[in-house]
């Protein structure tokens, strides 16, 4: 069973009745669902995920005023719900602050730094980690008659402002070209397995982020970034296969198997990935440069940025995000 299904079933069995028992008026003012941190919120959970924090539970999001008036009583009622449900126990919950009653403002401030929801400026958008925005917008909302929680969520799901998106694309292109197209083959020729691992790692993470950005989706926590590609329509299918082959080549190099072939293939695979990326940057009019070397696209991507503060930043400013 998936965690989202377990959560919805638990809410439908006990949640609505519990909320109405504390304050009937809350049934049309509270938002209820499951979102935030944890693989189950993304729908990525499996049998291995059930070793911790896989348990019946849900979130109840309240306005500041309703939280002040009813939060304590509602949390007390929530804590008294059955601990066993459909074969799973709430004793498995470690991160208790991820479930139960919370302020809408606190939930969004936790991920975006802004209690009103969205980052307040382009710079705030740029500095907010992608995985935090993914966590703020994942999961499901089971009920939200008032639409306060959902309206913030929908605004975040509209994705980055255009200038911020361009700045991030430029950073990803810069790292992909530097770590993959330039440095990877050089460190492979030196026989430096650790440097090759680091180069491929930086290239891979930037590639994953690039794909999510081009699909207008926030990239989740690194552990789930590759897994989440299966949900993306643009580039994901082709690049998933290429990244998988790259990982196999690296393992061959580390284990000193088929060295010459593995070295050249690892470089060729990064070139194929960058070619596909360059074509998509052109197709979406982020760049008008005809080149597979992604470094060549930086100026064209940055030229479309209107925000003077972002335009003045070096292309690689966001490369560690």
Image (cartoon, rainbow, N blue to C red):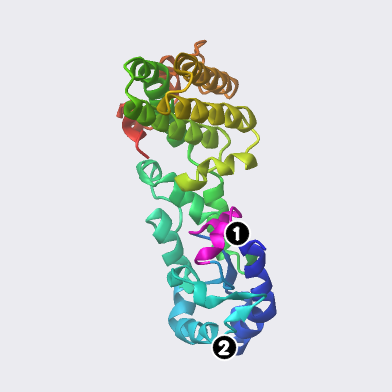
**Residue beneath disc 2:** 22
Name the front one of labels 2 and 1. Answer: 1
Crowd class of label 2 (few under 14; some 14 to 19; many from 20; radius 10 Å): some
Crowd class of label 1 (few under 14; some 14 to 19; many from 20; radius 10 Å): few
Q: Position of residue 61 (x, y in %)?
A: 52, 70
| Vertical position of residue 116 compared to residue 128: above or below | below
Q: From mark 2 to mark 1, how far is it between C-alphas? A: 35 Å
The answer to whether the residues at label 2 and label 1 have Cβ atoms under 8 Å apart is no
40 part of magenta stretch: yes
Q: What's the magenta region?
A: 37-53
Residue at coordinates 48% horizontally, 18% vertically from top-left?
258
Which of pointers 2 and 1 lies earlier in the amino acid sequence?
2
Residue at coordinates 57% horizontally, 82% vertically from top-left?
83
| Vertical position of residue 138 compared to residue 300: above or below | below
> Camera-side residue: 30 or 132?
132
Could you tell me which quadrant the C terminus lies in? top left
What secondary structure is marked by label 1?
helix
Would residue 270 be found to the left or right of residue 141 on screen?
left
228 part of magenta stretch: no
Q: Quadrant of residue 300?
A: top left
What secondary structure is marked by label 2?
helix
Would residue 295 be seen by someone viewing this image from the given angle? yes
Could you tell me which quadrant the N terminus lies in? bottom right
Would residue 315 be seen by someone viewing this image from the given angle? no
**Residue beneath disc 1:** 47
> Camera-side residue: 262 or 110?
262
């Amino acid at each position: 069973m998936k965690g989202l299904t377990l959560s919805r079933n638990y809410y439908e069995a006990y949640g609505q009745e519990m909320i109405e028992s504390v304050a009937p008026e809350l049934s049309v003012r509270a938002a209820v669902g499951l979102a935030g941190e944890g693989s189950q919120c993304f729908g990525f959970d499996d049998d291995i995920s059930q070793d911790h924090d896989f348990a019946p539970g849900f979130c109840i999001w309240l306005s500041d005023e309703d939280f002040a008036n009813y939060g304590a009583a509602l949390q007390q009622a929530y804590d008294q719900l059955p601990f066993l449900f459909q074969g799973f126990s709430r004793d498995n919950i470690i991160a208790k602050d991820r479930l139960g009653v919370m302020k809408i403002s606190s939930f969004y401030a936790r991920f975006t730094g802004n209690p009103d929801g969205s980052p307040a400026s382009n710079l705030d958008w740029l500095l907010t980690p992608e995985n935090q925005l993914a966590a703020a917008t994942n999961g499901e909302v089971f009920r939200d008659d008032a639409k306060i929680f959902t309206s913030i969520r929908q605004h975040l799901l509209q994705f980055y402002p255009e200038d911020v998106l361009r700045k991030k694309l430029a950073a990803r292109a810069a790292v992909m070209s530097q770590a993959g197209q330039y440095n990877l083959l050089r460190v492979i020729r030196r026989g430096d397995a650790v440097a090759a691992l680091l180069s491929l790692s930086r290239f891979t993470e930037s590639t994953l982020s690039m794909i999510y950005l081009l699909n207008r989706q926030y990239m989740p926590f690194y552990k789930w970034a590759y897994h989440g590609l299966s949900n993306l329509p643009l580039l994901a299918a082709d690049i998933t296969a290429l990244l998988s082959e790259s990982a196999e080549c690296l393992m061959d190099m580390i284990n000193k198997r088929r060295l010459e072939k593995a070295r050249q293939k690892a470089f060729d695979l990064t070139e194929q990935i960058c070619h596909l990326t360059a074509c998509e940057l052109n197709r979406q009019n982020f760049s008008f440069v005809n080149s597979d070397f992604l470094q060549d696209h930086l100026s064209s991507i940055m030229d479309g940025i209107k925000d003077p503060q972002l335009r003045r930043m070096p292309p690689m400013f966001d490369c560690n995000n």
